[in-house]
Image (cartoon, grey):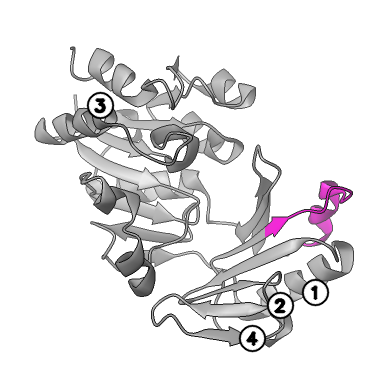
Amino acid sequence: MGKKLLLFDLDDTLLTSKKIITPNSIQAIRNCKYKGMLIGYITGRARPLKAEVIKRPFFTDQFGLPCDFIAYYNGAEICVGDTSSASIESNVISYENAMEIIHRLIEIYPNSKIGVMHEPWSYSNLSGENWNNETGEKIKCTIFELPRHAVQRIRIEFDKHDDKSKLYDCVTEETNFFVTSDGTAMILNKNAIKEHALTKASEYFGIALSDIIVFGDDINDMEMLKSAGISVAMGNAIDKVKQVADYITETNDNEGISIWINKYLLNT
């Protein structure tokens, strides 16, 4: 048996509905690290940049979790090491492509809320503010006046009457999208997918996919779960995720992570 790598989705998987990580899950993951396993996270969340870190530590730092690998924005930014580590690979949307997509979104979904992550900036068309996550600076501007930065993610919160299927008319050859279980859509570089981040972790650490264990709950976790050696769906996962997983554990609010780890990895 090779060295093991555990990769966790965060929201609704490792994080409870109250956005915390339970003490039992923390201890279980620490025990895995103590036994020589590597620990990583693949999340749709943004990278915590300087100003944000000062105000609100990222979850791995907040709860004192080991971190050997972390991919943000589903894999748009892939890092080895803790949350202070630089990217070893970036899968971003070019500024030109992003503006083309945004023009289409505004035309098709004029009442939607659109957020753009273009590090170190974060923009919301609801507030009309572009916020620099490193300095805290805020600039009023329209979505068409954004600085020429590559884009990690475009996030869309739809109006209740919007037809989500028209998103196919918004993406370009460089990009893809998915709609989460809460109805929010994400447009990313076509390589910013969790399956690719999983493969990158496998290559970097020299660990076979068969020795990687992944945990997830939502539609964007599916291909990652299909590709890993062992896949674990949370009890609160959507049905499609449960159907592709090797195991189904308890929910994120009922110690699903610690129960599975203790039973199958720590034998407690």
Which residue is the site of mark 2?
99
Which residue is the site of mark 3?
24
From mark 4 to mark 2, how far is it between C-alphas? 18 Å
Where 216 falls versus 244 (above or below)?
Answer: below
Q: Nearer the viewer, mark 4 or mark 2?
A: 4
Q: Secondary structure at mark 3?
A: helix
What amino acid type should be assigned to the residue bearing mark 4? Lys
Q: Nearer the viewer, mark 2 or mark 3?
A: 3
Q: Nearer the viewer, mark 1 or mark 3?
A: 3
Residue 25 can be seen in this image: yes
Q: Dots 2 and 1: beta carbons under 8 Å?
A: yes
Which residue is the site of mark 1?
103
From mark 1 to mark 3, how far is it between C-alphas? 47 Å
Q: Secondary structure at mark 1?
A: helix
Residue 221 picture location, percent across and down: 52, 37
Residue 168 picture location, percent across and down: 80, 54
Q: Quadrant of residue 4?
A: top left
Relative to residue 148, is residue 201 drawn left or right? left
Where 188 falls versus 244 (above or below)?
Answer: below
What amino acid type should be assigned to the residue bearing mark 2? Met
> Can you tell which mark lies on residue 140?
4
Q: Secondary structure at mark 2?
A: helix
Image point 58% across, 86% down: which residue?
Answer: 139
The N terminus sits in image quarter: top left
The magenta region covers: 156-170
From mark 4 to mark 1, how far is it between C-alphas? 19 Å
Dot 2 crowding, Cα within 10 Å, few <14, some 14–19, many 20+:
some
Image point 10% across, 34% down: which residue?
Answer: 34
Where 158 falls versus 30 (above or below)?
Answer: below
Image point 71% across, 79% down: which residue?
Answer: 143
